[in-house]
Image (cartoon, rainbow, N blue to C red):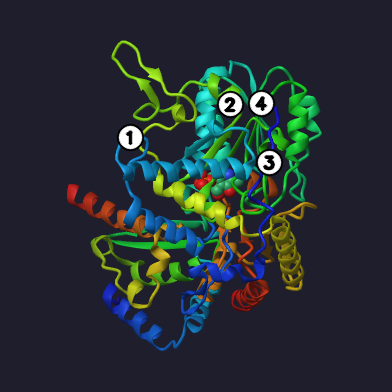
Amino acid sequence: MKSINQIQEEIVDDFSLFDDWMQKYEYIIDLGKKLPLIEEDFKTDEYLIKGCQSKVWLKAYPEGDRVYFKADSDAVITKGIIALLISVLSGQKSEDIANADLYFIEKIGLMEHLSPTRSNGLNSMIRQMRYYGVGIQTKEKEV
Amino acid sequence: MKVKQESILMKGTRSVERAREDFPILSTEMNGRPLVFLDSAASSQKPISVIQAINYYYREQNANVHRGVYALSQKATDLFEMGRRRVRDFINAPSEKEIIFVRGATEAINLVAQSYGGHFFREGQEIILSQLEHHSNIVPWQLIAEKKGMQIRVIPVNKKGELQIEILEEWLSENTAIVAVNHISNALGTINPVREIIAKARNFDVPVLIDGAQAMAHGPVDVQELGADFYVFSGHKMFGPTGVGVLWGREELLEKMPPWQGGGEMIHTVSFEKTTYNELPFKFEAGTPNIAGVIGLSEAIAYLGEFNFEEIAVYEKGLLDYCVKKLTQIPGMQLVGTAKSKASVVSFLVDGLHPYDVGIILDKMGIAVRTGHHCTQPLMEYLGIPGTIRASMAFYNNREDVDRLVEGVAKAQMMLS
Ligand SMILES: Cc1ncc(COP(=O)(O)O)c(C=O)c1O
């Protein structure tokens, strides 16, 4: 399995091929459209992360010292960015998730999507993903 | 008693066609494209004269008001009080005492709910609002209703976004504490039949508060002619600065209302045994007011006075019709709010597209619109939609802005579907 930073580097490389915002967003939209990231059954309040503009659902599956994520959104651009985040974080070690420096977001020029004024739920989603990482870590330490 | 002042409105001779040039921000860029600003319902842009007045005030006229004996303080006080007179003229209020400066529409509504409501509302009474209200005209009433044990009733809308006010015949009674509705809906642009609402309420001596936040940028409001008891608005939606707004109330009511916030300015004498309050309007203006804000608002009113409001109304109607015509040529276009009487606000959805996604693509193209629920969640819930894309126009917008919007929406549709 590639490390978080290896995957981030690959994403940054992919995005360096785009000349303008349109190509970049078309790619993100494509990612967003490609697959249902979560089963319809999980699109419930239990998994809902409150964003005021777009909705985000997140479910974590711990397996040993790793955590897998599934997530979804009703807005396709948000969903595309979620797909990127999942490709970076899902299946990684919990402590790596908790401590990850997600620099690729800034490098590929998507920082604006994490601004609180966008209120699209992405910020809270990342925070929640880290909590899952921390949660498992601390549990382990208690044993 | 009805007093008609010589209004500074309607006399202007400048044509709106050139107004755009007065707004420096409209010749800037956003994301590398010339800015198309279609979010004036959230906050309007400011003309250069307003920006300069505020700048000049801080450079050469700044001092606290109503206090200093020195010339500078006197000057600042004069400017501040001139602002009050201009507001009075602008809404044709009978007296300057009825013009209370606040932070904005939200604060004005809270003031009335807490002071008037706190004093006069009784357990078991009803507050009547409408389905079209902004959260600012819902939550302050919920707070006081909760405290007093009152009910809130909501005037329904039809699918076009028009209030169904016939229901008032049934609902209004001696048990109605107040009716509070907006003049123009921020989410849909519906111009509400406030005159009829006020007339119906009159029959039962029920006071009426009109939330005029969206109205002031679109046309003159004559509070005496309207006959409301309270009228509130924000400076920043009428080409003035943020942080300043107005509560207008009938003097007779304001006199009976207890102060809301305590502090400097609002007192006459203070002792630990007994404090006496200043007279209107100062009774409701605790603490140092937003002096620069009032001066900016005052300048915005002077600026509006250069135009003819009838011409502005015709111009905006033309823009609205053009925008609706152009947008409806896009396949899958779904206009939200098609009331007969509308201000230059167009809320819409495109089949299969999330408003947020459309907003992002438009942003990249230099087009500023608002997406989401527009602080009207109960309305969105009623309409069964999560939100809309809203383009709101002022008289500084033009057909080119509309063309760019339509082009942007078409492109968003191409990219997203
Ligand atoms: C109809 C309406 N009422 C009240 C408000 C609140 O205004 P402010 O935030 O300036 O107090 C707004 C602002 O969006 C509005 O549109």
Residue B270 x %, y % = 32, 19
Q: Nearer the viewer, mark 1 or mark 4?
A: 1
- Inspect the image, locate mark 1, and give the three-letter code of the amino acid beneath it: Arg
Callout 4 secondary element:
loop
Residue identified by numbered label 4: B207
Q: Looking at the rendering, which quadrant does residue A64 occupy?
A: bottom left
Dot 1: what SS? loop
Q: CA distance from mark 4 to mark 3?
A: 17 Å
Is residue B174 at all visible to an observer of this figure?
A: yes
Residue B251 badge: 2
For disc 1, the marked residue is B67
Could you classify mark 2 by the number of other residues whose Cα lies within 10 Å: few (under 14), some (14-19), or many (20 or more)? many
Residue at image location 30% in from the left, 81% down from the top: A9
Subunit of label 1? B
Q: Chain of mark 2?
A: B
* Closer to the camera in the image, B386 or B44: B44
**Residue drawn at point x = 28 percent, y = 63 percent:** A97
Determine which quarter of the picture holds residue B5: top right
Q: State the mark number for residue B222.
A: 3
Work out whether A123 lies above or below B184: below
Tell how many labels. 4
Residue B226, which numbered label?
A: none
